[in-house]
Image: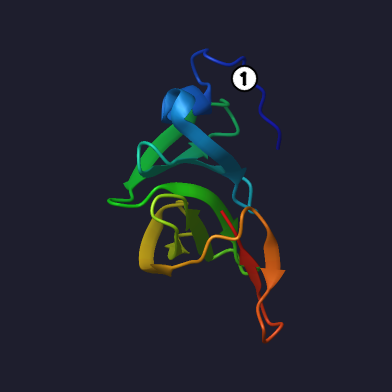
Amino acid sequence: TTLLYPVGTAGDPLSQASGPQSHSTRFHPSGPFLYTLSVADKKITRFQLDEATGKTTPWELKMDGLGPRHIAFSPKENLAYVVHERPIRVSSLRVDVQTGRLTPIRDWPASPTCGRKTRDPSAKAWMLGV
């Protein structure tokens, strides 16, 4: 599914989410959920797409003390991982695959790698840098 909205118009998910402070936006692999992350506003906004009307319904998760920057989903699509910029941390979240809502599991410190991705020493995972 591809949605095109002129920037700044009614229904434009980026403008609705955080205005100019949104850093990244990604669809959930299943399709109807769009996530917008805002470092400055310290929140993740999930928009649920009504495919019949094209309208979106927002829901917000405040990330108190964390600045969400990027999101990635697990292969089973039921977990999400968020890299934060300020402070540099990584969070794991459960994804309700029916509603797209996120529930924090935990977060932990990460080391800055200047935007690079590298394999961890065990070669079982990728480490992503901010």
Residue 77 falls left or right of residue 89:
right
Question: Can you tell which quarter of the image residue 74 is in?
Answer: bottom right
- For image coordinates 58% across by 16% down, the residue present is 7
Residue 107 falls left or right of residue 111:
left
Q: Position of residue 67 (x, y in %)?
A: 40, 47
- For image coordinates 44% across by 24% down, the residue present is 19
CA neighbours of label 1 inside 10 A, class few (<14), some (14 to 19), many (20+): few
Q: From what the image shows, is residue 28 above or below residue 120?
A: above
On the image, numbered disc 1 is attached to which residue? 5
Q: Quadrant of the N terminus?
A: top right
Residue 97 showing in the rendered view: no
Q: Nearer the viewer, residue 68 or 72?
A: 68
Q: Position of residue 45 (x, y in %)?
A: 42, 40
For badge 1, the amino acid type reads Tyr
Q: Nearer the viewer, residue 39 or 92?
A: 39
Q: Position of residue 78 (x, y in %)?
A: 53, 66
Q: From what the image shows, is residue 53 above or below residue 127?
A: above
